[in-house]
Amino acid sequence: MLRRLLPRPDSGEGLMRFGVRLLVVVLCAVTLLQAMRPAVYSTRQGVDSIRNRSNEQAAPRHMEEQLGRDIHEQIPAGTRVAVVDEDLNWRLRLAAAATNQGMVVVGDTVARTPVVGSGVQLEIWRESDPAAPYGVRLMTRKPVTS
Amino acid sequence: MITSALGVLLLAAAGLPLGFALTRSWPLALVFSPLTGAAVAAAGVLLMTWCTGPLLLWVAPVFLFTVWLAWRLRRLAPLAHGRWGDALLLFVPLIPPYLMLAQEPMGWDAHMIWWMHAGYFAEGGEFTRFATGNLSIGFGHQDYPPMSSAAVALVWKALGTRDYYPASIVTGVVTMATGAAVVYAVRTVTAKAPALVSWPAAIAVGLSAFSPLWIVPTAGFSDAMCASAFAAGAVLLLFGSDPFSRRTLPLTLLLLCAAGLMKNEGQSMVIALALVGSVKYRRNIRHLGWVWLPVAVSGVWSVTVRLLGAQTDVLTGGRFGKLLHGDPDTTGRFDTVFSTMYHRVDQVLVFALAVVVLGLLFLRRRRREFGLAHDLWLWAVVALYWGALTFIYMITPNDLKWHLGTSVDRVVICAVVLACASAACWAAVAWYQPAATDPPAVDPSTADNHAASGSQR
């Protein structure tokens, strides 16, 4: 069975051509194995990540999801909000979470510039609060300047 | 986890009729159902964006249309390799690297781009139209195509959640389905080789989408799914025994249209393939429309979002004028761009190109006997796509090092998968042992269509 599978010279095929054919097979195998190495690494990392799951790792996701739920519960959809969190990372994540909940994000979210004239109805940011679910709370206020 | 599982089931259910219409095989329909479900959702998003209204209102008629389509096409001959055993081989070997989907889904691009788009799609047409042009969330690149976000939006909306695990899992299974599609494509065109060679080679091509950066397919990005869908469609179109037959063309077109609706780079890919396909099939004018259809579909989305105010940073602030005037700062970027791109893929590309050279020198006749079209068609697509990427990096208004550092590992995936598809085909050709009474290369069941089409090889 195995011998039937292995490549063998065709009738009339010279040794050199057969050798080149084998070389092509080997080079193809090398190409495909090289390209598969990251998939093998991903498998190992995936097994590790299943084994080592922890609440600590999940905390940022829980916070972001909780802030989204807070936005959904506290602010009517369609409200024009400006995200004024001091941390750029959280400012952008809050802007995305607010958009996901149907809020109209206004102002320059990246630069956190004043939002005069943008019709902002609420400013939102996040504050740490150990008593809140996942240790974070959504804060809102009417705009200081509008 | 229950929500994630429900999300996958929902997407599979949404895509099953379209999968059956394309394949007439329940096992294949099931394997491709996350991808076809995403296609149904994307069609719903397009209609919703034009006409406004809730997402589900537009997904429902699209779904019913696919049910009708499946019923109409049920008697068409099923695609080859459509048994349950084949379906398992298409899907199961791809599962291990996707265990990484268990990681915390906190990827920046996934949240700020793909899942934010899903969020505003889920809020309905009016909100989508406004959010698409809202510069306050311009960091989300609202011009990016809708397919992966549409799949997440459908699941989020139907299950009433905005949690990120379901989004990550849904994005991951759509990527897996495109991986299965490229395995299917390579297996189909190399079917004359022994199964023990053809299947492992095809599976390896499916897994090559994890190269060069292993994290990309499971991080909520659309790059690996776009590259795999495109490679699958390109292999079927360029190497299929009868690419324009009623049996195979619908699946090929779905894969290519999907690639064009997954990433902006996907648009470059389908344009590259359309150019190459136009030359390859130049004697069959009536087929050229099919070759350009994916370009038109992706163009519809591009025009739609630009009319709504979305901007593409490369187009709005690019250095195109400077490049035309030979600005040294711009032309001087070429070396950096080329070497950075090349060094991400050199470990695969060097061997793949060596195979091509040896194959072209010594195995051309054998390849013809095997029934495979010339390999240079595929490499012409790679070269055009590579050129498009180089051009975009040269005119980018962003800091070049930052732009390359944050994207080059993802945009070159397509070149890797296509190079591996080329290698897999050469492996099959080299291993293939022609029998004295070898059947013709063309699939007998499609021989009539093939003769009618006069496909060029």
Image (tube, coloured by chain):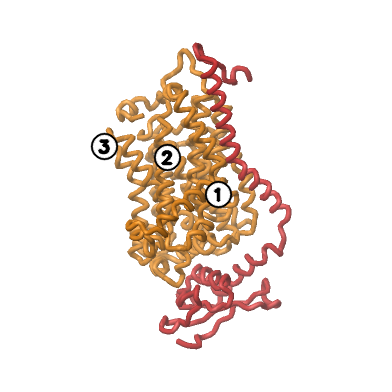
Q: Residue at x 52, y 64 (%)?
A: B112
**Circles 2 and 1: CB atoms closer than 8 Å:** no
Label 1 neighbour load within 10 Å: few <14, some 14-19, many 20+: many
Helix, strand or loop at mark 3: helix
Residue B82 appears in the figure: no
Labelled disc at residue B234: 2
Q: Are marks 2 and 3 on the same chain?
A: yes
Q: If the image is split into quadrants, where does the N terminus of chain B sit? A: bottom right
Residue B286 locus on image (x, y percent): 27, 37
Labelled disc at residue B285: 3
Which mark lies nearer to you, 2 or 1? 2
Label 3 neighbour load within 10 Å: few <14, some 14-19, many 20+: few
Is B447 or B287 nearer to us in this picture?
Answer: B287
Name which residue type carries label 2.
Ala
Q: Distance of mark 1 from mark 3, alpha carbons?
A: 37 Å
Residue B128 appears in the figure: yes
Q: Which chain is orange?
A: B
- For residue B412, above or below residue B198: below
Helix, strand or loop at mark 1: helix
Name which residue type carries label 3.
Ile
Q: Which chain is red?
A: A
Labelled disc at residue B173: 1
